[in-house]
Image (tube, rainbow, N blue to C red):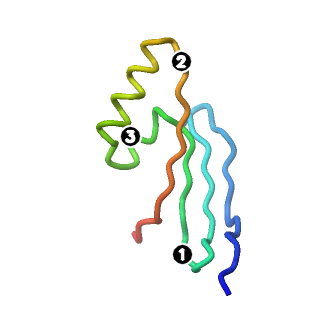
Amino acid sequence: MKRPPALVQFIPFDPTKKLSEATITSGDGKSVRIVKARSTQSSLGKPSVPGSAAVKELEKQGFRVLAVAEGRLAVR
């Protein structure tokens, strides 16, 4: 039976870094890092070209775009 995700660490919004993040252990036992911060996410991984275009269009219209990224933790 697969276990539900478990929170390992949560870092509240840091205005200096302009992001908040959490690390969880997924049901299959793998660590996953979840980051919430549109402006910072592009420095954490390869941005989606269609996604970036959509964000730029929404920002031109005056919308504030928030995004959430999820992915496996890299082994360092």
Q: Amino acid at mark 1?
A: Lys
Distance between the alpha carbons at the discs numbered 1 and 2: 35 Å
Circle nearer the viewer, 2 or 3: 2
Residue at disc 3, secondary structure: helix
Distance between the alpha carbons at the discs numbered 2 and 3: 18 Å
In the rendered view, tell whether residue 64 sits above or below residue 45.
Answer: above
Disc 3 designates what residue? 42
Upstream in sequence: badge 3 or badge 1: 1
Percent across and percent down for residue 19 are 57, 39
Name the residue located 44 percent from the left edge and 42 percent from the top edge. 41
Percent across and percent down for residue 15 are 62, 31
Name the residue located 47 percent from the left edge and 59 percent from the top edge. 71
Disc 2 designates what residue? 63
Q: Please identify the quadrant where the N terminus is shown.
A: bottom right
Upstream in sequence: badge 2 or badge 3: 3
Q: How busy is the neighbourhood of tag 1: few (under 14 within 10 Å), some, or many (20 plus)?
A: few
Query: Which of 58 and 75 lies nearest the eye of the viewer?
Result: 58
Q: How busy is the neighbourhood of tag 2: few (under 14 within 10 Å), some, or many (20 plus)?
A: few
Disc 1 designates what residue? 30
In the rendered view, tell whether residue 28 sits above or below residue 47.
Answer: below
In the rendered view, tell whether residue 66 sits above or below residue 32.
Answer: above
Distance between the alpha carbons at the discs numbered 3 and 1: 23 Å
55 left or right, relative to 30: left
